[in-house]
Amino acid sequence: MNKKKLSLISMLLLIILQIPAKEIPLVSSIYQRSYISLNGKWNYVIDPLENGYYDYRLQPFKTAGFFENKKAQDPSDLVEYNLDTSPLMNVPSDWNSQDEQLFFYEGTVWFKKDFPIEKKTGTRYVLYFGAVNYDAKVYVNGKKVGEHIGGYTPFNFDITEVIHDGDNFVVVKVDNKRHKDNVPTVNMDWWNYGGITREVMIAVLPETYIEDYSFQLKDGNTDQLTGWIKLNYPIAGQTVSVEIPELKVKQQLRTDENGKAWFGCKAKPVLWTPEHPKLYEFRLSKENEKITDEIGFRTICTEGKKILLNGKHVFLRGISIHEEAPFRSGRAWSREDAVTLLTWAKELGCNYVRLAHYPHHETMVREAEKMGLMVWSEIPVYWTISWENPATYKNAENQLHDMIYRDKNRCAIVIWSIANETPHSEARDRFLSNLSAYACNMDNTRLISMAMETTRNPETKTIHMEDSMNEYVDIISFNQYMGWYWGNMTEWANANWNIPYDKPVIVSEFGGGALQGLHGDSNRKFTEEYQEELYKYNLQMFDRISGLSGLSPWVLVDFRSPRRQLPGIQDFFNRKGLISDSGNKKKAFYIMKSYYEEKVKDKR
Ligand code: GCB
């Protein structure tokens, strides 16, 4: 039997066997598909003892859990919960900023949403979550459809077989308890916002649909494009087409036995740059499906100590950003949030943002791309995680995979970063070198980095940046807090640097706290004047680094952190922002801005 027939038969078998609901490969670019939004008000039940999940012997319920969404049928029935009459909360959003009693809460909350469906034949229904922090167990009409671990990446389930025409409901058990073996681990410097923090939608797709696609320059040649389109079934001989109207490209392709169709053509696109962030409309289609997307092209590589964007030396004028909502605090999730944050970055003079310390919302990356901001994207392998635990490694690798998978078509992303401030050990080295190899293997068109730490010799006033992991990165990057956690500013401003690698260097963090509006002596911590001074001296110090290729000061906006308790000053905010949580710029903002203005002039 030929391959084409075989794959057709396997597809038919899959349909006939009525695959139960399950996690499936991510439907790429979900926002470009037709979908039913489940955003809005969801009922929620706070369940600190996980009473809705375990029985009194602490055995998981097979039935009788809250996921059943049971209703008393008769006044004598005992049902000790009611998802319908429980309070309502906005989804997407975090629970901490929506209900006072959940501000510090870490544990389980149940969510429920009813949704009507007009179920059509020949259609697949895919339930998609942009992100749920941290452990999500998902049930549709009382049946478990899957579970997802990790708070910052999307996932989806094929729910076609568990929904019916008419009224349906979805229940999600969300648990954000911290555990030592998780990624991130128990210790971190940001708020562990719980909940369904990004959009929920049901993609309505044809039985055979375009699952994923990728387009880019071929091997860095600026006059050749390459790419592929993949269907959800391994079925050969299907026709798919690609059109890029502006480049006058139109091709019909045939899938191979893996359901993948390969694309290649000669074309000379205008390259994406921060000054001219050119994107091309792509139209992908199959007999009963059409997707449009915007994709840009650029090359990124290093040459000795330089970073080259489209073959030209570029200095990364950056800023670090947490996914913290401007003005209202809480987890940022909307397009408006993204645009506000990125507009501030542009105002600062940036051509680059470090999206710390986990994959941000897809919209954030897309908006950065449109606005001409290069992006560093990272996974929450942060501080001291369980290096020895294979499950922790697998978890980190999954998050890395999901980050790269989601954003592979985003030309704005130039750096994948896989760790932040990790302590030396053999186990760590194994862990990180494996992650680095994994990232390179999955995507060799971007640069790899890890934010490291320096050591200092106070006698010789030398700062050393040496780490065995630097062998596995394209860019040497490190965080350092001279003038805040260590060192006298005037003494260290002319420090010597020992960075013995022929690779570009980025200072991935530096900074200090200031309460916006608190003025005083420039040697008094937490005044705007202290922060201003700290920026001046640090910048002087960095200018002495040979091969300095970029900076991403810590951080654009003050963000919530349970580690920051100083009353009247911090009040659970990390105050290292150049902008306050209420959106006011601090003095140091303007120091950084004029430094970047000079950098732009230098280039001319
Ligand atoms: C760091 C961390 C960052 C913290 C920052 C600080 O080095 O990477 O997550 O928030 O320092 O403010 O101490």
Image: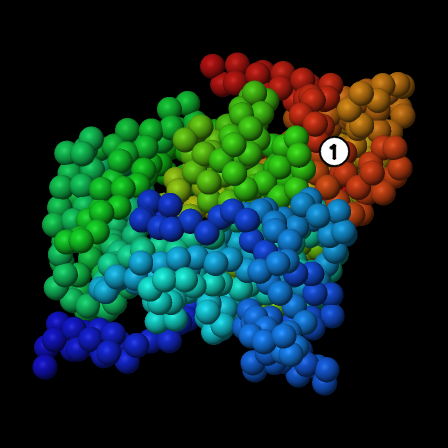
* Above or below for 458 versus 372: below
Q: Is residue 534 left or right of residue 21?
A: right
Q: Amino acid at mark 1?
A: Lys
Residue 71 picture quarter: bottom right
Q: Is residue 276 left or right of residue 602?
A: left
Residue 204 shows in the view:
yes
Q: Is residue 47 left or right of residue 596?
A: right
Instruction: Decide if ligand 1 comes within 8 Å of the CB at mark 1.
Output: yes
Residue 318 point in image, percent of width and height: 57, 31
Residue lying furthest left in this view? 1
* Above or below for 282 versus 529: below
Residue 136 picture quarter: bottom right
**Is residue 349 or residue 11 the one in the foreground?**
11
Question: Crowdedness of circle 1 by 10 Å Cα count: few (<14), some, many (20+)?
Answer: many
The structure residue drawn at horizontal position 75% and vertical position 47%, both measured from the top left corner, is 100
Q: Give SS at disc 1.
A: loop
Residue 408 point in image, percent of width and height: 39, 49
How many numbered callouts? 1
The structure residue drawn at horizontal position 41% and vertical position 31%, both measured from the top left corner, is 370
Residue 511 point in image, percent of width and height: 73, 33
**Is residue 151 or residue 257 the one in the foreground?**
151
Residue lying furthest front in this view? 75
State the quadrant of the N terminus: bottom left
The structure residue drawn at horizontal position 70% and vertical position 65%, both measured from the top left corner, is 47
Answer with the quadrant where ligand 1 appears in the image: top right
- The residue where tag 1 is placed is 576
The structure residue drawn at horizontal position 66% and vertical position 30%, both measured from the top left corner, is 327
Residue 541 shows in the view:
no
Residue 280 picture quarter: top left
